[in-house]
Image (cartoon, rainbow, N blue to C red):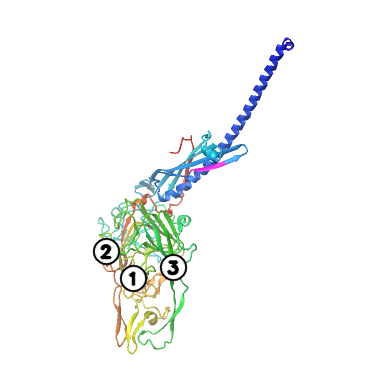
Amino acid sequence: MKKILKSQSGNIALAMLLAVVAMMSGLSISSMSVRDTVAAQADLENIQSLHFLRAETFRGQAFLETAAKIDPGLGGGVRTPLREVAITSSHFAKTYTMQSQISRLKTESEGTTVIVGGESQSGSTGAGENQYLVRSLIESKTGVGQTAYFSTNKSVVRKYSELTIVQDTGPVFMYFTDKELDPQGQAVRFDGRDYFDGPVHSNEDIWIRNTAGTANPDAPGWPRFDALVTTSGVVRVYGGASTYPRDQVFHGGLYEEYETYEFPSEMSGVRNNGQLVGPPTYDANNIILVEVASGSYTGAWGKVQAPRRARAKYVPTWPYNYQQQPDVYNFFPVTDTVWVPLSGGSCNNRSNFVNSKLWIRGQKTTNGQFASFSGFQTWGAADTLYIIGDILIDGTSPPNDPISNRGSMVGLISEKSVILKYGFWNPLDTLREHTNMGADAEHADPAGGGVFIYAAIAALNDGGTNAYKDGVFTFEYQHPHGSIPAVVINVPGVGDTLFDWIDLHRNKYPQTPSQVWPPLLDYPWYNPLWPERAPYLMRGTINIWGGVSQKRRGFVRRNYVNDPNNNPNGVWDIPVDFCGGSSAPNPIQVQLYANPNVFVTLQTRDYPGANSSNQVGYRKNYQYDKRMYKLKPPDWPHFKRQGERLPMEHGNWLLKRPPRALL
């Protein structure tokens, strides 16, 4: 070593060695620094990409929730728009790109075997679930803006995940009732005129009865159910019989003491997602009239005015002796409705929310028919929804089955009740209309003239302690009686004279305990077209292709008197369904004037050609829209069994090896 140090060549060699060592040490330290920097940036990209991946997954779910309302099958899949996010710092510049591909994995219907009380039975309620897959991919490029746009230098850090989302579709029942008894505690029963080919459920006992009717050829006089029937109670026979032909009545199976379905009291989906039609705030004095033609609507906005006070001479022989001064006057409120045009718009492939009463039908055409609804539409009303004409759908002509119709479906929801209107004064053409009526021979049995409703219907109101306020699907003006219309009389010495409000002149109004309104004379304004000399009893057929869900079972056909008669004295108290005496079509001749003698005959009657069954209301032709085993109108309320999961839930979220691209 000493020789090397003393040698000149040795010193040079040592110096060179030290230089090499120093250089290698510098390179090593520099390499370590670069590796640390690259590793830090990779860690940052890795963490940042994971956060973006989670956000993109939730974005994909949001897109799914919207797309699945329109097309639950997601034909062809759905892509989220490509999203770019730039992140920069003094030593970092990256642009992240992210996108999701959403598709339906499969649809599973509820199993055909259900265990009830330990017993295995077959059948289907129509419930099931859709399973969807959200595939999300995150990539990044160096640089931001145009630098990133034109760069092909993609980062090695890429993230990919697959999220499974399960949507419990629940059933759209053909017929679902939360409460079976009428508001007065009487059992509303199915009889020999009732036929159902879709799933039926009640949260209470189901009542059946053997009567006249041909709906069930296997058991004449009994109702017939061709699909599964479930009840949280049991089946009871009205009249006290202990047996009935179970297999001939319930062809699709019967489960008694089944789970209870939770009945929603509001349409949260329509409220949260629906397009607002009409005023933004609720007012019980607002009426929105909507006429739909294909995918658009027009209409009018009715504003019910504050009542004005009117008076009429109380003269029991009015208009005879009309000039005499009475001892008393009748004072009564008169309410006017002012109508203004409603701005129209598009309504298909969405839900539509009306924050008031809603009158709805297809747009009336020049030949008196009704236009159809196109796309998937739901119309929801915060107050009562009145059907004022046919609800038809594009692609299906009545009375045909819509089973092959892939483009149109309608939902009608009320947070109060859904009612078939008897008649109204049409603000669009100023004519008085009897609506929803027709002759039976207009279509072959079981269809008939009256009204066609291609829709799922839901009446949601929970009346609490007041059963009369529970949501029902029913018809307007259930206890008709004649009333005296305006009349022109040639009064001697005066000439032709118009007399109006004759009933209000002849009878004490409002009634008092000592002066009650006559039981066979219509109470003022109970008939929406009051006064009407000969109102209609039977009005045709309710033709439904869809389903009906209601808080309490509503009437669609009534006897001339309540059965059993809970109003034997014929008193008038309309809010509790006390509506005078019998509606039987017995003529009543009333003298209006003497010298000259003027008479008017009051008599209820069936609509021309409507079946005479000694009742009031409609025949039923209810058919299940079997597409609703898998599809629903947009934002349809979720009827789920107690303890069942929410409509759309996360399944597995899996991080996987990234593919080359989302296909």
What type is the residue that disc 1 sits on? Answer: Val
Q: Earlier in the sequence, mark 2 or mark 3?
A: 3
Dot 3 and dot 1 residues touching (CB under 8 Å): no
In the picture of the structure, the residue carrying the numbered disc 3 is: 340
**Residue 248 is covered by the magenta coloring:** no
User: Which of label 2 and label 3 is nearer to you?
Assistant: 3
Mark found first going from the N terminus, 2 or 1: 2
The amino acid pointed to by label 3 is Val
Q: Which residue is mark 2?
A: 440
Q: Name the residue: 46% across, 47% down.
A: 63
Q: Mark 1 — residue?
A: 561
Pick the residue in front: 247 or 124: 124
In the structure shown, which secondary structural element does the residue marked by tag 3 occupy?
strand
Tell me residue 100's x, y (percent). 47, 42
Who is closer to the viewer here, 121 or 507?
A: 507
> How dense is the environment of label 1, judged by Cα within 10 Å: few (below 14), some, or many (20 and up)?
many
Q: Which residues are magenta?
A: 82-86
Image position, residue 456 (x, y; %): 37, 56
Q: Main secondary structure of the magenta part?
A: strand
Any part of residue 201 in sight: no
Q: Amino acid at mark 2?
A: Asp
- Toward the bottom, the furthest residue is 493
Q: Secondary structure at mark 1?
A: loop
| Label 2 secondary element | helix
Choose between 580 and 65: the one closer to the eye.
65
